[in-house]
Amino acid sequence: MNDCIFCKIVRGEIPCSLIYQDDKVMAFKDINPLAPVHILIISKQHIESVQSLDKNNSQIVAHIFEKIPYIAKEADIAKSGYRVISNIGKDGGQVVPHLHFHILGGRALCTALG
Ligand code: AMP
Ligand code: ZN
């Protein structure tokens, strides 16, 4: 059993503010929001990061990106716009080693990436 924090959320061992789920993904509010809307969409399967994707598991990314427009619409940021980010590894600022994408919106985001 994996004891990563997001695996625990998937198993219901840690509560979350659930926005959407199906058999493959889960979306919930970030516990430390950096914008008025800050939602995380994660794979239910434990995949460490984008760097761990390959031809056997990368279909999950298409599924995640199919759901993002729906989640953004429900969160009322589809028209105003938003940003999708995935942090990878140490220099990427990844803290939780489980594939996830941040959906940030509800205010104008700064243009700098670094
Ligand atoms: P990252 O730096 O990309 O790994 O981001 C991990 C994100 O997970 C951070 O924005 C945290 O605020 C968020 N986070 C950590 N624990 C939880 C939790 N239990 N529920 C919701 N969000 C969390
Ligand atoms: Zn995990």
Image (cartoon, helix red, strand yellow):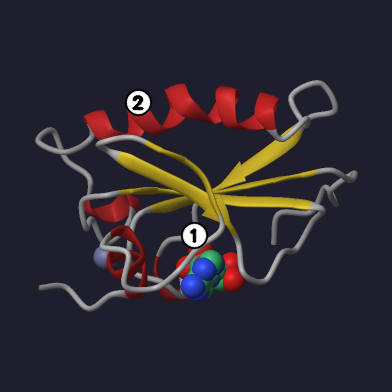
The circle on residue 66 is: none
Q: Is residue 67 visible in the rendered structure shown here?
A: yes
In the image, residue 77 lies at what x, y percent? 77, 31
Q: Quadrant of residue 31?
A: bottom right
User: Does residue 19 lie above or below 17 as drawn?
Assistant: above
User: Does residue 111 lie above or below 114 as drawn?
Assistant: above
Disc 2 residue crowd, few under 14, some 14–19, many 20+, Cα 10 Å = few
Q: Quadrant of residue 10?
A: bottom left
Q: Quadrant of residue 108?
A: top right
Residue 16 placement, left or right of 77: left
User: Does residue 28 lie above or below 31 as drawn?
Assistant: above
Q: Is residue 92 visible in the rendered structure shown here?
A: no
Residue 65 placement, left or right of 29: left
Which residue does the image show at 58% across and 23% down from the upper left? 69
Residue 12 placement, left or right of 103: left
Disc 1 target residue: 87
Disc 2 target residue: 62
**Amino acid type indicated by mark 2:** Ala
In the image, residue 102 lies at what x, y percent? 57, 51
Which residue does the image show at 21% across and 51% down from the upper left? 45
Numbered label tally:
2
In the image, residue 105 lies at what x, y percent? 77, 43
Which residue does the image show at 57% across and 23% down from the upper left? 70
In the image, residue 49 lies at what x, y percent? 32, 57
Tell me the CA gap for discs 1 and 2: 18 Å
For label 1, being within 8 Å of ligand 1 is answered yes
> If the image is split into quadrants, where does the N terminus sit?
bottom left
Q: Nearer the viewer, mark 1 or mark 2?
A: 2
Q: Secondary structure at mark 1?
A: loop
Which residue does the image show at 84% across and 43% down from the upper left? 106
User: Does residue 37 lie above or below 30 as drawn?
Assistant: above
**Amino acid type indicated by mark 1:** Asn
